[in-house]
Amino acid sequence: MHKAIKLTALIGFSGLLGACAQAHKASNMPVKKTVPLNQVNEIVVTDVTQVTVQKTKSHPQISFITRPEQAPDMRLSSDHHRLTIEGNSASTHITIQASGLTLLSVNDVNHLSVGQGLRIKSMALNDVAQTRIRGTVYLDRLSLYNQSHLNAYAIWLKQLSLYDQSTANINTLSAKEFNLDMHGQTQAVISGHANVMQATLLNNSKLAAKRFYTQRAFVKAFGHSFARVSVRKTLFSFNEPTSVIEYYGTPKVYRRALNGSATLPMSKEASF
């Protein structure tokens, strides 16, 4: 009888442990929370694993999937126009559903995905390991900093700036006037057409572009930079003989070499 009571007690205690373990496991399960954006038109995201940005047909909102104890810190500005989201390097996936944002700033993120038809006035990527743009998106300005990497099918874009060993691989750039600035060992490959008005390469930057459709564009290369482009009528200008521009086509060439002479060899390729 004593053994039976003891065995029953042990079974009851083990059952309680199991229930506690199940409760603890449930408390650590990832949960999804959704927050309406209302008047927000600027979003700054820092230190999360993954960010997805999508066009919305209804009310703008932001949702995140994470463990309860790892929920990101979210703060609204006093005028309710800017939302700041700070994670903690945890496995957090944030989804932003919005249209017509003035600013989207993404910092220290492993993966950023941008959906079809999205309109953002200015997007800044800092230390974003991989950014993928699916379909056509509409941006006025896109800036990449600190070894950020971009893969895009099509962008309607006026200004692209690359800094700090960042790279961009783009199929098609559509805009009446497009400007490209490349600083500090950056690399850009444009495999489709691009209406480029001006491209400036600095400090060991590399550009490969198959088709510049603009009738009057400037390509400038400085500081051991390299450009290989296929053009119609493009004006080339560079101030340093350490930089090289290769072209294929029939451009009118304007050369200005302050520190010596430079050559423009012909090339039939437009890729590295």
Image (tube, rainbow, N blue to C red):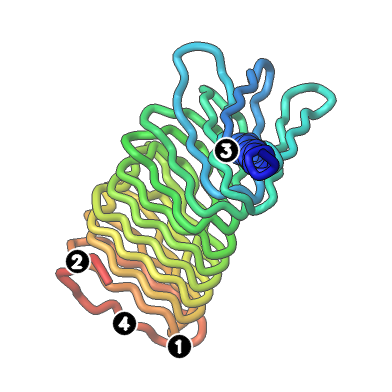
Q: Nearer the viewer, residue 148 or 171?
A: 148
Lower sequence index among marks 3 and 2: 3
Q: CA distance from mark 4 to mark 2?
A: 14 Å
Lower sequence index among marks 1 and 3: 3
Three-letter amino acid code at the position of disc 1: Gly
Q: Nearer the viewer, residue 219 or 182?
A: 182
Name which residue lies at 50% across and 86% down.
259
Q: CA distance from mark 1 to mark 3?
A: 66 Å
Q: CA distance from mark 4 to mark 3?
A: 63 Å
Q: Which mark is residue 260?
A: 1
Q: CA distance from mark 1 to mark 4?
A: 10 Å
Q: In the rendered image, which quarter contains the C terminus?
A: bottom left
Q: CA distance from mark 3 to mark 2?
A: 58 Å
In the image, is residue 199 above or below residue 98?
A: below
Q: Which mark is residue 248?
A: 2
User: Would residue 45 be seen by someone viewing this image from the given angle?
Assistant: no
Three-letter amino acid code at the position of disc 4: Thr
Q: Nearer the viewer, residue 168 or 244?
A: 168
Lower sequence index among marks 2 and 1: 2
Q: CA distance from mark 2 to mark 1?
A: 23 Å
- Tell me if 163 is positioned left or right of 17 in this view: left
Image depth: mark 4 or mark 2 in front:
2
Q: Are marks 4 and 2 in contact (CB under 8 Å)?
A: no
Name which residue lies at 58% across and 43% down.
92
Q: Seen from this angle, which residue lies furthest bottom?
A: 260
Q: Which residue is mark 3?
A: 29
Instruction: State the SS at label 2.
Output: strand
Q: Seen from this angle, which residue lies furthest top?
A: 58
